[in-house]
Image (tube, coloured by chain):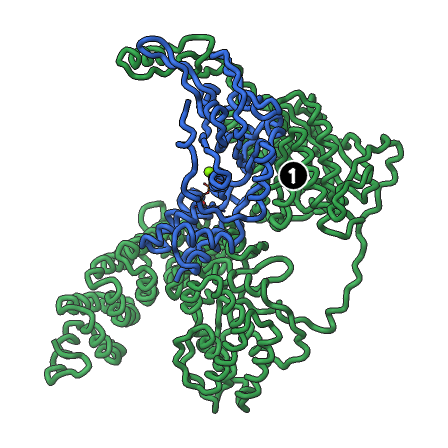
């Protein structure tokens, strides 16, 4: 049996609530509802779940989903060994057995035939059939399934199936408002509030360009990176170009505009 | 070497020696020779001076009178100061070539403009380019008899040489080359027209000149500036260039020169100069940005005042204070813009204006303006310093207001008034703040402000449609009560009337090049019938490569990858698309396209045709419908293309007859369209909505209502498994489109690019 303790979140993660999401999540967990967190990249979804796992004192197993992932990568598989075969639980199975919160990050990245294996865990049966092994797992009472999902994906081919969506209670996230985001930057990086506010205002410039050549604005995560670089002694001009602008765009006009915003903001 | 300023005792002798070397007897030369020589000695080496004199001697003996010599003596020292004295051989060579041709008359203008040309072309390569160009022009326009020898002088060459500095003020050398080539090509054999061309008189000469101008052209940077306005200021407007005959960067407009046309904005957009050079250490693009920042500030913070209450002088002062208030607020957001403003703002010298002879009001205000922007202004004037202080206090409490600074401005005018302010002789130097707008938006006039009667131009509903089908009813979401109004909207559907299919074919022909490009992209998207899926634990076939690799891993004691099978699947796109077109009134608006105008409707027809053609190539089922509304009792839904219909003449005929009219009740139309799309068997369903404005209708006052309803209907569609995506042509769409469609929209800022953007967006969405 896997050690439950190793998946616990011991250090309290810093999480700045945006609204009443903490209380709502506690309610959803109390009812063991599967949860979906929606929102653009880097707006705090993963951090939120990590924080909730810590707050609830439950183990957390995170799976970063990708295109090549198969159902076995989630559920488990037989391994060949010198003297026979051995079954190895996948992360989803482990979570169901030990009663962890299983967080499937960026679920739309996974192929749809992979995603369907979670369905039985999301209805009232809370079971997981291991077909190859001939075992039916009844999920531990503490088990909860959480998926994250970025609806801003500009491709309908990557959208989540309606039959999957319908199984979750949803939290909708967006980038925090300016004051909160400033607080987050200060706490995460230790820079001063003035510089943090300036970074946030550059973030706002990019977010106003969403739909005009940018699919997504500058994420909170990137703002934290820039703040961290500045704290480490990099000039704001360089830090912003490197952490905020270059990663998000190859469009010259957008890049020039953001560079100009940086130059106009930092003397 | 003697100091030329204080010639030593031997000077008269040396002067005489040089004069002897020059060896010419024109009396006019005596008058200027000493001064020229002093200039020459300052920049040239002894050998350089000697070469200078030698070249002068050649020119004096050339038989073209005294003028070439005088021009050379005067121009060369400053030219050499820019290019270096060893540029002389190249110049000399050019002179010789001209001299040997029948174009001797051109030598004087060539030399007279040499220094001015060098100032614009300060590198040797550029200058050489100019010399080559000059000779080429000469060759190609000198007439030959029987093709044997050149015997007619080029008619256009002297004109060209005279115009060269003017041309180069605006054109880079490459542009000049193009301009010259054009003239040679078209007027090489036509003396009068050639002269008209090369003296910048003829219309096409000016047109080509405009086309080749250097600097930062607004037309080339519209998107960049649009992004600037949107990103940094959350504002958007049409940017309209005006012809800037003189670059307004120079501050020192003379009293008699009319002040340059300043930027401004009105209902039709923001007007900016068509071209701006780098100037005063600021790049052309940053000069545009400075103007836009200033204007965006006005648009955000200024409120109009009644002009009738103030004298012209008071108004001038109010404008200066208001401009300064705006910039103070701008700098709170973007502090580092200050250095750009400071570089562009003139720095009038204290005491430069003489109040005994000139009206100094402009000068005083420009100083004040400088001081309000520049903490290090250093002016001593007591009134100025007091009002700077009072301004700072006014602004300390927050944003203040146009009225608040107007009060301050009036006090300032009262305090500093002088009799001579009335003088006709106005001190203009350093008073033109060219990046700021002309403030016409700041003034309202009583007599004009009476509410004009608005005509209701709305056409009455076509009551003629007697025999249409009974309506379908749809609910509408009332966000205030958070409930649906059941059966609120009556929707009538019908087949769209038909026109000429040839119209659509013409539109498609127009985009043949684009279509070819799209085709290549489409080929990449087109489904391959069977694709291999590798790395399968269970699959239909063994994937040998992987299996062998796994076996090796296994034999060597490592954990083998069990995904050694592969399978095949048919990779159909399995996608159905419904394109819903907003056919409301505003679709009839005109937009600038290239040099002409087109309606949004026409552009939409082009775009929709291309898209339909593209989707047909991919084989995805596509339906097209349009809608408009005239109150909730009459929403019309018009079929343009059914899912099962091919892209053929009947569809083209309907598209050709598309018309604009009425309003945009989007929610109901989407619900109805969903009804058809949901019935499609495809796994993925995409509804594209092409619109140019926000949902609205004549019977709805509350702007939010139909926005909220549309948002609700997007949610309903999502429940039905329909992915909605909006393509908006409304620059202001950000205010509401995100509310309705979440992140699923694109705003096409540059409507003329719609025909290529629409298919591109579709392909990106379904990749
Ligand atoms: N509400 C928040 N409280 C604390 N940190 C946050 C918050 N939102 C964002 N962050 C910061 O942004 C980074 C990225 O957030 P993350 O949760 O990984 O984004 P997502 O999962 O949405 O892509 C975090 O590492 C953290 O530094
Ligand atoms: Mg994450």
Q: Note whether A90 is above or below B595 in the view shown.
A: above
Say which residue appears at 31% left-offset and 53% top-offset: B129
Chain under disc 1:
B
Is A155 positioned to the left or the right of B65 in the image?
Answer: right
Cβ of mark 1 under 8 Å from ligand 1: the answer is no
Residue A240 appears in the picture as rendered: no
Q: Note whether B671 is above or below B48 in the view shown.
A: above
Residue B508 % position (x, y): 60, 32
Q: Which chain is blue?
A: A
Secondary element under disc 1, as helix, strand or loop, is strand
Is A116 positioned to the left or the right of B8 in the image?
Answer: right
Residue to which mark 1 is pinned: B690
Say which residue appears at 66% left-offset and 42% top-offset: B691
Q: Quadrant of the C terminus of chain A?
A: bottom left
Drawing shade for chain B: green
Residue B511 % position (x, y): 57, 34
Q: Residues within 10 Å of mark 1 (few under 14, many from 20)?
A: many
The mark tally for this picture is: 1
Say which residue appears at 68% left-offset and 48% top-offset: B589
Say which residue appears at 60% left-offset and 57% top-offset: B269
Residue A37 % position (x, y): 55, 37
């Amino acid at each position: 049996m896997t050690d439950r303790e190793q998946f616990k979140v011991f250090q309290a993660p810093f999480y700045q609530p945006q609204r009443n999401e903490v209380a709502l999540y506690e309610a959803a967990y109390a009812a063991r509802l599967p949860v979906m967190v929606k929102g653009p990249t880097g707006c705090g979804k993963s951090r939120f779940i990590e924080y909730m796992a810590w707050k609830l004192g439950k183990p957390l197993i995170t799976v970063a989903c990708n295109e090549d992932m198969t159902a076995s990568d989630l559920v488990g598989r037989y391994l060949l060994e010198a003297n026979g075969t051995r079954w190895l639980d996948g992360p989803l199975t482990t979570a169901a057995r030990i009663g962890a919160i299983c967080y499937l990050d960026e679920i739309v990245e996974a192929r749809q035939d992979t995603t369907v294996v979670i369905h039985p865990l999301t209805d009232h049966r809370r079971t997981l059939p291991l077909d190859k092994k001939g075992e039916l797992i009844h999920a531990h009472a503490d088990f909860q399934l959480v998926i994250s999902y970025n609806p801003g994906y500009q491709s309908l081919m990557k959208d989540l199936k309606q039959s999957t969506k319908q199984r979750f209670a949803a939290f909708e996230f967006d980038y925090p408002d300016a004051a909160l985001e400033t607080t987050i930057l200060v706490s995460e990086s230790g820079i001063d509030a003035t510089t943090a506010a300036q970074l946030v205002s550059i973030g706002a410039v990019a977010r106003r360009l969403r739909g005009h050549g940018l699919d997504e604005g500058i994420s909170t995560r990137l703002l934290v990176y820039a703040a961290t670089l500045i704290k480490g002694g990099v000039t704001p001009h360089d830090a912003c170009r490197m952490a905020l602008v270059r990663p998000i765009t190859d469009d010259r006009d957008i890049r020039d505009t953001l560079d100009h915003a940086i130059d106009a903001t930092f003397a | 070497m003697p100091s030329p300023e204080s010639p030593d005792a031997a000077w008269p002798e040396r002067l005489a020696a040089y004069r002897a070397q020059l060896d010419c007897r024109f009396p006019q030369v005596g008058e200027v020779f000493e001064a020229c020589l002093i200039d020459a000695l300052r920049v040239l080496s002894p050998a350089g001076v000697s070469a200078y004199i030698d070249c002068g001697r050649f020119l004096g003996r050339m038989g073209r009178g005294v003028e070439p010599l005088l021009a050379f003596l005067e121009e060369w020292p400053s030219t050499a100061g820019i290019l270096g004295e060893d540029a002389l051989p190249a110049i000399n060579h050019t002179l010789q070539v001209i001299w040997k041709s029948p174009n001797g008359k051109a030598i004087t203008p060539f030399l007279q403009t040499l220094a001015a040309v060098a100032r614009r072309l300060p590198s040797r390569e550029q200058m050489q380019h100019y010399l080559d160009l000059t000779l080429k022009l000469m060759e190609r326009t000198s007439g030959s008899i029987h093709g044997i020898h050149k015997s007619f002088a080029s008619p256009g060459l002297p004109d060209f040489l005279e115009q060269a500095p003017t041309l180069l003020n605006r054109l880079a050398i490459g542009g000049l080359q193009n301009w010259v080539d054009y003239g040679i090509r078209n007027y090489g054999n036509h003396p009068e027209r050639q002269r008209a061309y090369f003296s910048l008189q003829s219309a096409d000469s000016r047109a080509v000149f405009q086309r080749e101008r250097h600097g930062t052209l607004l037309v080339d940077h519209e998107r960049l500036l649009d992004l600037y306005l949107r990103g940094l200021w959350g504002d958007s407007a049409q940017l309209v260039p005006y012809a800037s005959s003189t670059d307004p960067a120079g501050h020192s407009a003379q009293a008699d020169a009319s002040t340059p046309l300043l930027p401004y904005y009105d209902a039709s957009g923001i007007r900016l100069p068509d071209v701006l050079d780098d100037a005063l250490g600021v790049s052309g693009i940053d000069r545009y940005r400075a103007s836009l920042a200033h204007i965006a500030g006005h648009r955000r913070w200024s409120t109009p005042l009644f002009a009738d209450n103030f004298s012209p002088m008071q108004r001038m002062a109010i404008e200066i204070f208001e401009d300064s208030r705006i910039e103070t607020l701008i700098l709170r957001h973007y502090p580092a813009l200050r250095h750009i403003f400071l570089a562009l703002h003139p720095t009038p010298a204290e005491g430069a204006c003489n109040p005994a002879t000139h009206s100094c009001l402009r000068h005083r205000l420009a100083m004040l303006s400088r001081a309000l922007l520049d903490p290090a202004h250093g002016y001593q004037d007591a009134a100025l310093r007091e009002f700077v202080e009072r301004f700072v206090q006014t602004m300390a409490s927050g944003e203040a207001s146009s009225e608040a600074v107007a009060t301050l401005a009036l006090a300032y005018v009262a305090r500093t008034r002088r009799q001579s302010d009335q003088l006709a002789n106005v001190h203009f130097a350093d008073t033109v703040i060219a990046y700021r707008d002309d403030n016409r938006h700041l003034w309202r006039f009583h007599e004009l402000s009476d509410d004009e009667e608005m005509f209701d131009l709305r056409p009455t509903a076509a009551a003629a449609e007697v025999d249409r089908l009974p309506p379908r009813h749809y609910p509408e979401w009332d966000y205030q009560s958070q409930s649906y109004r059941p059966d609120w909207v009556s929707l009538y559907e019908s087949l769209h009337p038909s026109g000429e299919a040839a119209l659509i074919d013409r539109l498609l022909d127009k985009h043949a090049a684009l279509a070819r490009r799209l085709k290549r992209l489409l080929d990449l998207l087109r489904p391959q019938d069977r694709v291999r899926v590798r790395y399968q634990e269970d699959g239909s076939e063994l994937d040998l490569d992987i299996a062998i690799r796994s076996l090796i891993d296994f034999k060597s004691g490592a954990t083998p990858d069990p995904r050694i099978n592969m399978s095949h699947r048919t990779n159909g796109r399995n996608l159905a698309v419904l394109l819903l077109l907003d056919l409301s009134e505003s679709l009839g608006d005109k937009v600038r396209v290239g040099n002409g105008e087109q309606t949004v409707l026409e552009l939409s027809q082009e775009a929709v045709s291309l898209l339909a053609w593209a989707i047909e190539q991919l084989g995805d089922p596509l339906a097209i419908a349009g809608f408009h509304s005239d109150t909730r009792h009459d929403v019309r839904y018009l079929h343009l293309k059914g899912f099962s219909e091919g892209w053929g003449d009947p569809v083209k005929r309907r598209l050709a007859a598309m018309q604009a009219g009425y309003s945009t009740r989007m929610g109901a139309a989407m619900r109805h369209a969903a009804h058809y799309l949901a019935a499609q068997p495809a796994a993925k369903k995409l509804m594209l909505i092409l619109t140019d404005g926000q949902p609205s209708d004549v019977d709805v006052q509350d702007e939010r209502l139909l926005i909220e309803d549309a948002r609700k209907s997007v949610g309903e569609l999502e429940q039905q498994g329909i992915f909605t995506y909006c393509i908006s042509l409304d620059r202001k769409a950000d205010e509401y489109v995100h509310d309705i469609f979440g992140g699923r929209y694109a705003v096409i800022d540059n409507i003329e690019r719609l025909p290529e953007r629409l298919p591109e967006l579709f392909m990106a969405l379904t990749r």
